[in-house]
Structure formats: structure tokens, C-alpha cells
Amino acid sequence: MSWTPDSIPDQSGRLVVVTGANSGIGYVTARELARRGAHVVLACRNRERGRDAVERLRAEVPGARTELRMLDLADVKSIRGFAEGWSHDRLDLLVNNAGVAMVPFSRTADGFESQFGINHLGTFALTGLLMPHLLAAADPRVVTVSSEGQRFARFDMTNLNAEHRYRAAFAYVQSKRANLYFAMELQRRADAAGLRLRSMAVAPGLTRSNVLTGGAHSTRGRVYGVLTRLLLNVAFRPTPEGAKTSLYASTVPDLPGGSYVVPDGPFQLRGEPVLRNRERAIQDASTAHRLWVLSEQLTGVRHAGLAESLLPHDDAEWTGRSPS
């Protein structure tokens, strides 16, 4: 049977943050949660586009409880500012949706390769800094958007930050594998600490959005833009279809922590939300642990309240270089 946003139960009373909510899957996720009664914070990098998104959402969902807050996952200072400015008594749901895909080489404000820095380290830091507010909620969830492409990653702990060379597609799928490692390790540490926190990961499938055309891609020229938009229209499915896995992971009441929700079609490219546990990254606790320790070192952020370490210290050593 088809799962649709109409299946979402009442979300009244839930406080939600959706990152990258001004467009694409993030916008649809925010809109449908607001439609069901949640108070949704749209966490956006660009103020003008964020305001446009809030106005559009309120026009589509009259009476929606929404607000805009600035957040740039490419800058740890901005992430800290977002967390320090949190003015609600708790946070029930964090949807880590924002990210970049296959962009030309660049570094974040903190010197990290942009895809690793934004997609993983920014997500890691934001979740950690918001952890006290999540743990103040009765039934907190964290949903992290990975990608079906993570299956093809050759995860190289010595080249996470483009220490040796940079290939855009390689760096992208590696950062998305890091998202899955993070979501699973977060659940392990929450379980070990006896917390009610549930961490999920999702893959949206091939979905139309501006992730391949906006941002850094806007400088690639007219031919790139035309061909990419043609590909998106022909081969990729409508954005609301891609948002289904995020909405499913965010709202299905009895979904267990540590779930990985993907489309049920061939190669996870399209279809209805289904749980998948046959992924190497889900079972690879050793690499997930090493990545977690490295992420703490690079961002300076620790997740208060979680179990400190589940593996011997030696297994967490890393031989790569810090960003220059």
C-alpha cells in the first residue's frame, strides 16, 4: 500500500527543526509537519530565501506555526549561535536535511572540505549542540538524511577531508555514508546511556531538488544548468515523493531507533518507505566509532548525556591530517 503524508498522525505540540527547509525535500518535510500541527522551525542559510519559504508555507497551510532561524552548516560559529539562541523549552524532532551534492572543491569557514564539512561535520555539530534540548523532550527523535548513493562509497578515513585528492562524486557518497554511520552510532550511544532518544537515517531516492543546480552549481554555466534540469525532469521523481522517507521516519509512532528508511523500489531509487537493515554501514560499529571520535576532535563538539565510548580507545585512532 502507498504511504502518503495523509498517514501522518496529529503532530500538535511537537517542536521541530528542519535544516535546509527553504526548498526541496526540506521544504516539503517542514510543510507537511506543519500541516499536521507541529511548530516547525525552518533552519536556513539564506535569510531572503528562508523568508520566501515561510511565506509560501503559510499561504499553503493557513494557520501554520512556523518560524525562521538562520543556520549555516558550513560554519561552526553559526551552528553554535543557532544552538545558543534556542529559546524553547525543548526540541522534539531534529531533521538533519541540509546538504550539498557533488560541488566543485571548496572549503568551509573552518577549513573542511565542503561536502564532508557541511553534510557530516555540520550535522554532527548541530545535533550535539542541540542535544540538551532534545533530551528535555519526552520522546525525542533525530532524522538524518543520507542517500542511496552511500552504498557505493569507499570510505577512506585518511581522505575524509580531501587530504590526498578530490573527486566530487566520491566525496559526496562518502559524506552520505558518514551520515549513516553517524545516525547508527548516535543510537548506540543513546541506548548505552539508557536514553529515550531515537535516531533514524533515511534515503530519499532520486528526487527533484536544487541540490544539483543551486548554490555552488550556479557558477557551472548555462550548458550544465540546462542538461542537469533536463535530467532532473526526466529521470527524477517529484519532490514530495522524495520527502516520504523523511516524513515516515519523523512521524511513524512505533518506529524503532536505529531504523534506516529507504524507498522499496529497485536500487532504492523510487518507491514507498520501507525499513532496511542489510547495509554494511549499519553493522560497522568500529568505523562509526572512529568517525565519531574524529568528528569530536575536528568540531570541538561533544554530545552531552550520551555514552562516552563503546569501543577501546585504540580503535578510535585516526591517521589522517587535520584541515589546513
Image (spheres, helix red, strand yellow):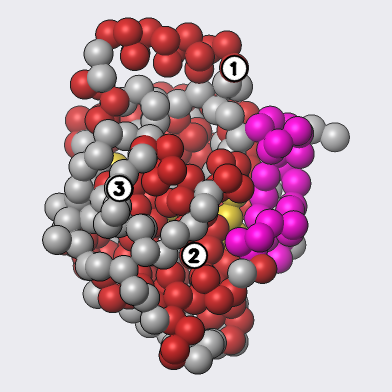
Q: Is residue 299 visible?
A: no
Q: Position of residue 284 (x, y in %)?
A: 61, 69
- Name above or below for residue 5 compared with residue 250: above
Residue 128 lies left or right of residue 290; in this view the side is left
- In the rendered image, the vertical position of residue 56 relative to residue 1, given as above or below: above
Do callouts 2 and 3 mark residues in contact (Cβ within 8 Å)? no
What is the C-alpha distance between the residues marked 1 and 3?
30 Å
Q: Pick the residue in front: 177 or 202.
A: 177
Marking on residue 182:
2
Tag 1: residue type?
Ala
User: How far apart, in angstroms, are the residues tagged by discs 2 and 3?
Assistant: 24 Å
Q: Residue drawn 28% across and 8% down?
A: 222
Q: Residue at x 49, y 65 (%)?
A: 182
- Find residue 25 and report its horizontal and vertical position in percent: 49, 35
Q: Nearer the viewer, residue 184 or 239?
A: 184
Residue farthest front in this picture: 164
Which residue is tagged 1?
235
**In the image, what residue type sits under mark 2?**
Phe
- Extreme right residue here? 1
Q: Residue at x 44, y 90 (%)?
A: 313
**Observer-nearest residue: 159 or 103?**
159
Indicate left or right for 244 with 90 as reference: right
Q: Which residue is mark 3?
A: 165
Q: Secondary structure at mark 2?
A: helix
Magenta stretch, residue numbers: 255-282
Q: Is residue 42 above or below residue 205?
A: below
On whether residue 273 falls in the magenta region, the answer is yes
* Dot placed on the residue nearer the N-terminal end, 2 or 3: 3
Mark 1 or mark 2: which comes first in sequence?
Answer: 2
- The answer to whether residue 134 is above or below residue 4 is below
Q: Amino acid at mark 3?
A: Arg
